[in-house]
Image (spheres, rainbow, N blue to C red):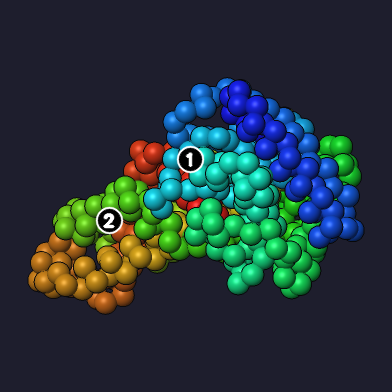
């Protein structure tokens, strides 16, 4: 797919790259039949940087509409960088989509072979491959480092394994009508390990670090509750069962709230059940849940340390009784719960794009 292409040379290069990609895939993975279709969209100006997250959303919509297994969206524009100084390509294995920019890839034959190399690198990410010393999965350090060498044997085996799974009939073709729960359950059962690996790959425990405003909102509520007499009077009276139940509810509510508030569940505007879509939602939900659990643990430790430092006579005055050590632990559970709820509210103020970028994108190549 391309954005507002009027340059015939560029169009010819894209077309040639597509042909070479097919022949490469046919040689490397002869057990599969490959079809690389092209579709054009001319919705953007060819100048200026484009937001890769928006492009990914367009790519996914197209992928669902046309029943493609993977989609590579190629644009002549630069991509707005997310973390690094610049980006050539952005893969999202959760969405089985990638965006690649040809702005820095040169011209002529060089351009064609670099497009193929970058496409292979991004496809490798979509197939769950890690970076390697040789082959297309070498870490991308700039246009010069792209190569169209064959995949090393172990990576080829791994990719074939993944592709076999994809080629196996998609669930929606097996039965026309599914209940919501049974459909998600079947999707989870079919590839539980793959889904868990995808979630793990997103390093959900780093999520609180990336979402600064969310974490700040959480920390503020924890500190507030630590230094408020009313908080101690209320939280100090709660039983273990109450604080644990609250913690469980708080974490689920915060996750659900973020998931719903950020439109994270909405990809493609279709009614039909889509296994890939269900898989994406499960991955996003899982990543978000683990991220929130990590945040809860961090807040718990912060609150525990804070409470320990407060002078005991002050706490006695606030709680009305002499504070036992376990009462302080219980109070830390309570404040951490309040903290994640605060975070969920703060998180909805966070730029939607930032949250999506953290949850959906594998790397910036
Ligand atoms: Zn990479």
Q: Residues within 10 Å of mark 2 (few under 14, many from 20)?
A: many
User: Does residue 56 lie above or below 126 as drawn?
Assistant: above
Coordinates of residue 200 in the picture (x, y in percent): 57, 64
Which residue position holds label 2? Answer: 219
| Residue drawn at x 13%, y 73% as measured from the top left | 312
Q: In screen coordinates, is 67 left or right of 95?
A: right
Q: Secondary structure at mark 2?
A: helix
* Residue 265 visible in the snapshot: no
Q: CA distance from mark 2 to mark 1?
A: 34 Å
The front one of 308 and 255 is: 255
Q: Secondary structure at mark 1?
A: loop
Which residue position holds label 1? Answer: 79
| Residue drawn at x 51%, y 40% as measured from the top left | 103
Can you tell me whether the CB of the residue at mark 2 lies under 8 Å from the nearest atom of ligand 1? no
The front one of 220 and 46 is: 46
Coordinates of residue 109 in the picture (x, y in percent): 66, 45
User: Does residue 125 lie above or below 96 as drawn?
Assistant: below
Is the Cβ of the residue at disc 2 closer than 8 Å to that at disc 1? no
In this view, the residue farthest toward the front is 108
Coordinates of residue 304 in the picture (x, y in percent): 27, 70
User: Does residue 132 lie above or below 59 as drawn?
Assistant: below
The front one of 89 and 13 is: 13
Q: Quadrant of residue 270?
A: top right
* Residue 309 visible in the snapshot: yes
Quadrant (top left/top right/bottom left/bottom right) for the N terminus: top right
């Amino acid at each position: 797919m391309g954005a507002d292409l009027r340059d015939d040379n560029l169009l010819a290069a894209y077309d040639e790259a597509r042909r070479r990609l097919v022949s490469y895939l046919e040689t490397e993975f002869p057990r599969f039949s490959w079809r690389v279709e092209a579709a054009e969209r001319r919705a953007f100006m060819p100048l200026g940087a484009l937001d890769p997250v928006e492009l990914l959303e367009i790519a996914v919509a197209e992928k669902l509409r046309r029943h493609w297994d993977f989609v590579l969206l190629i644009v002549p524009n630069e991509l707005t960088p997310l973390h690094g100084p610049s980006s050539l390509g952005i893969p999202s294995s959760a969405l089985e989509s990638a965006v690649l920019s040809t702005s820095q890839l040169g011209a002529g034959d060089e351009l064609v072979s670099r497009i193929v190399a970058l496409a292979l690198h991004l496809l490798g990410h979509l197939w769950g491959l890690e970076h390697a010393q040789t082959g297309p999965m070498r870490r991308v350090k700039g246009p010069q480092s792209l190569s169209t060498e064959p995949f090393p044997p172990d990576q080829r085996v791994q990719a074939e394994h993944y592709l076999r799974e994809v080629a196996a009939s998609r669930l929606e073709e097996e039965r026309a009508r599914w209940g919501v729960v049974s459909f998600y359950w079947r999707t989870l059962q079919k590839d539980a390990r793959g889904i868990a690996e995808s979630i793990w790959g997103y390093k959900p425990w780093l999520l609180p670090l990336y979402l600064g405003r969310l974490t700040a909102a959480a920390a503020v509520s924890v500190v507030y509750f630590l230094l408020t007499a009313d908080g101690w009077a209320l939280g100090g009276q709660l039983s273990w069962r109450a604080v644990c139940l609250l913690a469980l509810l708080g974490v689920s509510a915060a996750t659900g709230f973020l998931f719903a508030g950020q439109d994270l569940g909405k990809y493609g505007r279709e009614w039909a059940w889509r296994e890939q879509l269900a898989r994406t939602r499960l991955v996003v939900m899982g990543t978000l849940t683990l991220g929130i659990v990590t945040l809860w643990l961090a807040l718990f430790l912060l609150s525990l340390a804070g409470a320990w430092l407060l002078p005991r006579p002050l706490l006695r005055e606030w709680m009305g009784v002499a504070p036992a050590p376990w009462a302080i632990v219980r109070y830390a559970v309570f404040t951490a719960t309040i903290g994640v709820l605060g975070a969920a509210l703060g998180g909805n103020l966070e730029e939607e794009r930032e949250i999506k970028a953290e949850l959906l994108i594998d790397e910036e190549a």
